[in-house]
């Protein structure tokens, strides 16, 4: 997460454009991206953002909200900055949630998830964003313009990717994969009563064993363009009516 990206995000969420009421002629597509640990979520989301922004002719930039950047969005709700490290879906477990909700002086997990959900919906409503994780496909499913994607890959390839990307040994990569997948699955189950692996939650599932990250990004961007055209058509119909 670069300083420039954080600055762009903070500028975006504090701008008049972010808070201005939504109107029919401002409908824009957005992407929700779910991923198995090591399936290329960080790489693909950035490729999608760069491709879409490169082709963007509108005034609103394409931005990517990954798990780090999304925590920054909690500024919208005036939450303490030290919650950024605490609110980590990859570390989530039902037992730790119960302990924190029962004994911690911090805001409860449930209240933080509610605030995060509000922010996800707000961002999706504004469009031109890629939102990674945190049940974003479920949270934003009812909103127009969404392209909902899940990235999957084999256990072996994901461990290798994590080992190479984070420069860690094989055992640490396997533990990271298991911890992140388990935390995300439990988070979605506890708060949305859904199975994160349910393909029906997404428009399409991409296996990055067989589809390169570049091709995956291309597929997503093509669908975004289709959605953009559909939104424009619907807007014209509404205006004509």
Image (spheres, helix red, strand yellow):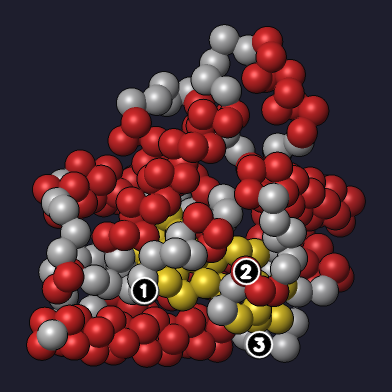
Query: Label 2 vs label 3: CA separation?
Result: 20 Å
For mark 3, does the 10 Å Cα neighbourhood hold few (<14), some (14 to 19), or many (20 or more) residues? few
> Label 1 near label 3: C-beta < 8 Å?
no
Residue at point 39%, 53% (across, down): 121
| Res. 194 image quadrant | bottom right
Residue at point 53%, 63% (across, down): 137
110 left or right, relative to 80? right
Q: Secondary structure at mark 3?
A: loop
For this rendering, which residue is in front, 182 or 120? Answer: 120
Q: Nearer the viewer, mark 3 or mark 1?
A: 1
Circle 3 residue = 211
Q: Secondary structure at mark 2?
A: helix
Residue at point 46%, 75% (across, down): 147
Expressed as whole percent of the image width and height from the top left, the position of residue 145 reads: 36, 74
Expressed as whole percent of the image width and height from the top left, the position of residue 130 reads: 42, 64
Q: Earlier in the sequence, mark 2 or mark 1?
A: 1
> Label 1 near label 2: C-beta < 8 Å?
no
Expressed as whole percent of the image width and height from the top left, the position of residue 7 reads: 27, 45
Query: Label 2 vs label 1: CA separation?
Result: 15 Å
52 left or right, relative to 196? left
Residue 190, can we see it?
yes
Residue 232, can we see it?
no
Marking on residue 145: 1
Rendered view: 88 above or below 126: above
Furthest toward the right, the residue is 171
- Position of the C terminus, as image quadrant, is bottom left
Rendered view: 229 above or below 177: below
Circle 2 residue = 201
């Amino acid at each position: 997460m670069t300083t420039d990206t954080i600055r762009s995000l903070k500028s975006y969420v504090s701008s008049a454009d972010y808070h201005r009421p939504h109107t029919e002629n401002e409908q824009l597509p957005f992407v929700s991206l779910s991923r198995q640990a090591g399936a290329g979520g960080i790489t693909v989301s950035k490729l999608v953002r760069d491709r879409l922004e490169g082709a963007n002719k509108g005034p609103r930039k394409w931005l990517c909200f990954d798990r780090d950047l999304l925590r920054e969005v909690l500024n919208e709700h005036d939450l303490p900055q030290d919650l950024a490290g605490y609110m980590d879906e990859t570390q989530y477990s039902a037992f730790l949630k119960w302990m924190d909700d029962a004994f911690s002086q911090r805001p409860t997990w449930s209240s933080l998830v509610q605030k995060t959900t509000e922010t996800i919906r707000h961002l999706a409503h504004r469009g031109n964003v890629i939102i990674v994780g945190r049940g974003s496909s479920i949270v934003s499913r009812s909103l127009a313009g969404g392209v909902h994607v899940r990235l999957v890959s084999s256990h072996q390839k994901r461990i290798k990717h994590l080992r190479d990307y984070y420069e860690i040994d094989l055992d640490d990569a396997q533990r990271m994969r298991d911890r992140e997948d388990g935390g995300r699955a439990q988070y979605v189950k506890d708060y949305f009563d859904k199975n994160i692996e349910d393909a029906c939650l997404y428009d399409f599932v991409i296996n990055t064993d067989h589809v390169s990250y570049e091709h995956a990004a291309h597929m997503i961007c093509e669908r975004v363009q289709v959605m953009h055209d559909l939104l424009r058509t619907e807007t014209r119909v509404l205006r004509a009516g």
